[in-house]
Amino acid sequence: MPSKRLLSGMQPTGGAGLHIGNLEGALRQWVRLQDEYEMYCCIVDWHALTTMYDNTEAIAPKAREVAAEYIAGGLDPQKCAIFLQSHVKEHAELHLLLSMVTPLGWLERVPTFKEKRDMLDERGGGDESVSYGLLGYPVLQAADILAYRAHAVPVGKDQAAHLELSREIARRFNRLYGEVFPEPQAVINEMTAVVPGLDGRKMSKSLGNAIYLSDDADTVAKKVMSAFTTPTKIKKTDPGVPENCVVCQLRRLYDPENYSLAWEECRSGARGCVQSKRELIEILNAELEPIRRRRKELLDDLAQLEEILRQGAERARATAADTMTAVRQAMKLR
Ligand code: TYM
């Protein structure tokens, strides 16, 4: 059994499960690391409540979709514990204890808090839609990680600030009560740290700019045809700027061997955006088709999926319970 531990998680929110930003930014790294680490892959359904508190019935089915997508994307449930956060109550206990040692000012400064507060505001919720839980979001995330005394946390770049806060909370706890937690390291792949969405902003469930693992081939084709390219490349012969073009960026990601020729032709005006889009559609669909098929098979056998989640939670609980014994001891709680 590998001695170093890894934990990561994704939220079961948004319209349609995971998108290719989640896949390339995070999940691919988990898959790559599953032989090296003792792995805990969480579906953070309690975190989803921070924005879906008024639509809770959508969370459980979405969580099953995400579980299927973890496995379809290459995670092996024999090697890693795949589980729901809400099935392992130790996360809640640790969240509460950590909340006592987390200064309020640290949380108010987190950029994602301000973004989410504004988003909820735009939805028309007013002041009462911004909960105590939303402010505490990064404390719950720290609890997810520290419950496993994880060394590594593979994530996309948007999670860097949360990870930094988890490290600070771990340090503060260790200083107050003695060394219980290793400082968790973010593992970020520079090439896929920020996968762009169809409109050039970061691909995100809440921006309507994502390609989902659940999208069929026609949907992927339609979405790619609508993607932003170089705004000044109107005719085929106009020079493109691949560095600023979503289609070219995704081409590099999905075709690392051959992309440079396509980029050259785009720059020199030897090819137009429509050709680039058509080729990208082929490449993307070839890559996504086996994931789609496996995802569907898994969702067609929900009983098996529930069993995987049950076993995953059991393994996770054993490790988290050990940590909680150490935490209570360090805090002199008896
Ligand atoms: P979430 O659900 O927003 O995203 C899941 C993972 O996907 C990455 N990601 C991206 N990477 C590259 N490009 C993109 N466009 C892109 N969009 C998303 C995210 O960085 C993340 O790694 N707070 C977390 C969930 C969480 C968690 C944890 C993560 C809760 N507890 C403990 C790690 C450890 C979140 O909202 O991720």
Image (cartoon, helix red, strand yellow):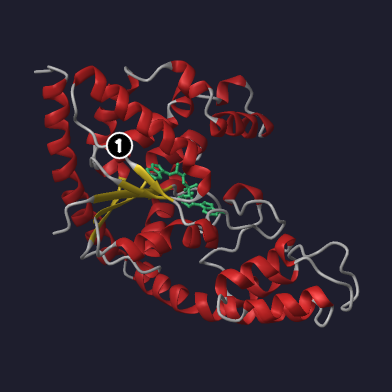
* Relative to 260, residue 306 above or below: above
Describe residue 34's horizontal placement relative to residue 291 as left or right: left
In terms of depth relative to the viewer, which is nearer, 249 or 93? 249
Q: Quadrant of the N terminus?
A: bottom left
Q: Can residue 242 be seen in this snapshot?
A: yes
Q: Residues within 10 Å of mark 1 (few under 14, many from 20)?
A: many
Up-down relation of residue 261 to residue 198 (above or below)? below
Indicate left or right for 40 with 211 as reference: left
Percent x, y of residue 292: 47, 73
Image quarter for residue 179?
top left
Report how many numbered discs are placed on residues in the image.
1
Can residue 19 be seen here? no
Residue at which label 1 appears: 183
Q: Is residue 73 left or right of residue 225?
A: left
Q: Is residue 97 above or below residue 316?
A: above
Q: Residue at x 16, y 35 (%)?
A: 323
Residue 167: x and y in percent read: 36, 33
